[in-house]
Amino acid sequence: DAGITQSPRHKVTETGTPVTLRCHQTENHRYMYWYRQDPGHGLRLIHYSYGVKDTDKGEVSDGYSVSRSKTEDFLLTLESATSSQTSVYFCAISFGREQFFGPGTRLTVL
Amino acid sequence: RKEVEQDPGPFNVPEGATVAFNCTYSNSASQSFFWYRQDCRKEPKLLMSVYSSGNEDGRFTAQLNRASQYISLLIRDSKLSDSATYLCVVNKSGTYKYIFGTGTRLKVLA
């Protein structure tokens, strides 16, 4: 158990609304990641963080922003949700070279 | 061509059978390799890292072939509980970037 929680676990929202997903870890890991998982695609990296206030873009970052104001929390924000952002979102930490995932957030944008 | 490719399956095998999956990767600079297991609607969980010399964990054996750029996972004496999707993951050398395959689905039948 890597001590990762995500909230909310499920969310339904409407197109155009802002949405923030939270990832919380209890073990002081430096590296944190946000992925999305869609049918026919592997997990795809949205953003990652290598420390407090240090973040970088992944391969599918358009329409998403992140913030990390303290080690334990990594927030993913959809500024104006679109139907193409309906997905399952996973947060991860890395320890050494291995990654460990949170339980996921299932987001539906209507 | 995708950076990491897996046969999506499903592989339907009887209990007790031996089954093997391969995963090919395109970037020869890839440095670290992993197999994850993902159950339906759950997060990926690390099954095993793959070392250059190959490694074994109980009924599971992982191999790396750098010359042909593939990794493999062998499951012996399959159990019903092995039914899941198996994800191949490659870490690019010198980066925090992990590339995921789309997964191979295994169904172990009674």
Image (cartoon, rainbow, N blue to C red):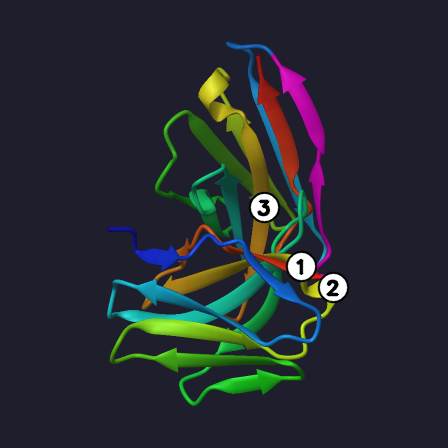
Image spot of residue A106 (x, y percent): 64, 32
Q: Which residue is mark 2?
A: B80
Discs 3, 1 touching: Cβ within 8 Å: no
Are the numbered discs 2 and 3 placed on the same chain, yes or no? no
> Regarding mark 2 in the picture, which secondary structure is present there?
helix
Whole-number angstrom distance, CA of label 2 to CA of label 1: 6 Å
Seen from the viewer's position, the closer of residues A53 and A88 is: A88
**Does the magenta segment cover residue A59?**
no
Between marks 3 and 1 in the image, the one whose residue lies nearer the viewer = 1
- Could you tell me the amino acid type at mark 2? Leu
Numbered label attached to residue B30: none
Q: Chain of mark 1?
A: B
Discs 2, 1 touching: Cβ within 8 Å: yes
Q: Main secondary structure of the magenta part?
A: strand
Up-down: is A64 above or below A5?
Answer: above
Residue at 67% over, 52% down: B39
Q: Which residue is mark 3?
A: A91
- Could you tell me the amino acid type at mark 3? Cys
Question: Is residue A14 something that shows in the picture?
Answer: yes
Image spot of residue A59 (x, y percent): 35, 42
Discs 2, 3 touching: Cβ within 8 Å: no
Residue at 43% over, 70% down: B33
Q: Which residue is mark 1?
A: B83
> Regarding mark 1 in the picture, which secondary structure is present there?
loop
Q: Chain of mark 3?
A: A
**Does the magenta segment cover residue A9?**
yes
Image spot of residue A12 (x, y percent): 66, 18
Drawn side of residue B78 relative to residue A36, left or right: right
Up-down: is A15 above or below A91?
Answer: above
Quarter of the rendering occupied by the C terminus of chain B: bottom right
